[in-house]
Image (tube, helix red, strand yellow):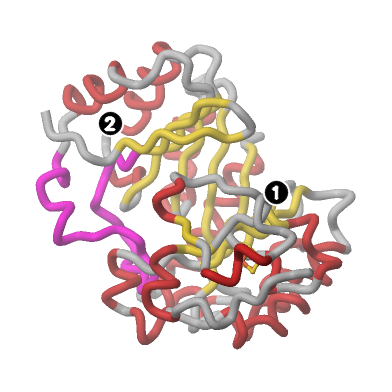
Amino acid sequence: MIDGQTVNYEQNGKKCITRIICFACNNNCVSCVTNYDKADKEMFLSFEDIKDIIDDFDPETKTIDYNGGEPTMRKDLLKILQYTRMKFPGAHIQLLTNGRMFSYNKYADMFANANLGSFRLFITIYGPNERVHDGITRTPGSFKQTMKGIRNMLDRGFDIEVRVIITKMNYKHFPEIAQFVCGIPGINRIVFIAAKIIGEAYRNRDAVLVGFDEMRDYVNRASEILIGHKGEKEIRLFHFPFCTIDSKYWDMIEGVTVPEVDITFGPECEKCSKRTTCPGIWASYADLRGFGEFRPIS
Ligand code: SF4
């Protein structure tokens, strides 16, 4: 069986798994972390292959994340989710999606009627409008469909986390994006994520990679808006080292949620008072930009 993509990690002491189940996608995001060249062999995993992969998951797993590519491109996605639920009745299942397929009422209804139990959708928004979002997805009409997908699934009672991936193409819009996502009724969790520069993002690194120093002011301004909604929404900044934003926003920084191999620290970090709680620096970022922007906190 072909299998090289299941990633095991721990979060708050609980066993978690993240797994790519589909490499096809109806978007063409400039910042996608999928490496299509290496992924060829896994493009067409059958349902039986996926079942075998699920059977191999650690029985103690508490959270299972499925991602891609775009998982909704699989015709058997619901079957996969239902099989997962049957094997892991107590687990929390999460699906990372661009949300576009959920803009179709029939598709949304199918999920609403599937009794998926503890289930959350992670849906990515890149911009506050069509121009910015579709510029990154390189797919005209994707913003409209994603927003309709979000509305459809909220109307059907789904729990949705909006994810905003930060790139050179949208960082100047952060404050606007923060305002926009906080204004979507029914969204109770918002996460801003510093982009990992692998896969397509690496191939397009000139367009995607932005330094923490360059985006600092925009991140601080967006954080000021986000913090204003903290009581009513859960807000997180993923993979922002403490030294890259103002200390008044540090509460929103999330600890390490990825395998440690993806994360690194610079030589100066050893002198930093936040070293043990810092989420660290994407190794893929440090490979390209070095450690010059990370200054120890006394
Ligand atoms: S100096 Fe290093 S350890 Fe300290 S906050 Fe920055 S990246 Fe984290």
Q: Which amino acid does label 2 sit on?
A: Asp
List the residue tagged with mark 1. Answer: 189
Residue 135 appears in view: no
Residue 247 placed where, x, y %?
A: 82, 68
Residue at 55% from the left image edge and 56% from the top image edge: 148
* Residue sitting nearer the eye, 34 or 115: 34
The magenta stretch spans residue 15: no
Quarter of the figure with the C terminus: bottom right
* Residue sitting nearer the eye, 280 or 251: 280
- Compared to residue 53, the image places residue 218 above or below, namely below
Q: In this view, does 255 lie to the left or right of 88?
A: right
* Image quarter where ligand 1 lies: bottom right
- Mark nearest the camera among 2 and 1 is 1
Residue 120 placed where, x, y %?
A: 57, 36
Residue at 88% from the left image edge and 63% from the top image edge: 228
Q: Residue 222 carries which label?
A: none
Residue at 44% from the left image edge and 81% from the top image edge: 289
Q: Quadrant of residue 273?
A: bottom right
**Label 2 Cα crowd, 10 Å radius (few <14 / some 14-19 / many 20+):** few
Q: Quadrant of residue 27?
A: bottom left
The magenta stretch spans residue 39: yes
Residue 104 placed where, x, y %?
A: 45, 47
Between marks 2 and 1, how big is the CA–CA gap? 28 Å
Quarter of the figure with the N terminus: top left
Residue 133 placed where, x, y %?
A: 50, 74
Q: What residue type is labelled 1?
A: Arg
Residue extent of the magenta highlight: 19-44
Residue at 52% from the left image edge and 68% from the top image edge: 266
**Label 1 Cα crowd, 10 Å radius (few <14 / some 14-19 / many 20+):** some
List the residue tagged with mark 2. Answer: 76
Q: Quadrant of residue 54?
A: top left
Q: In this view, does 37 lie to the left or right of 75?
A: left
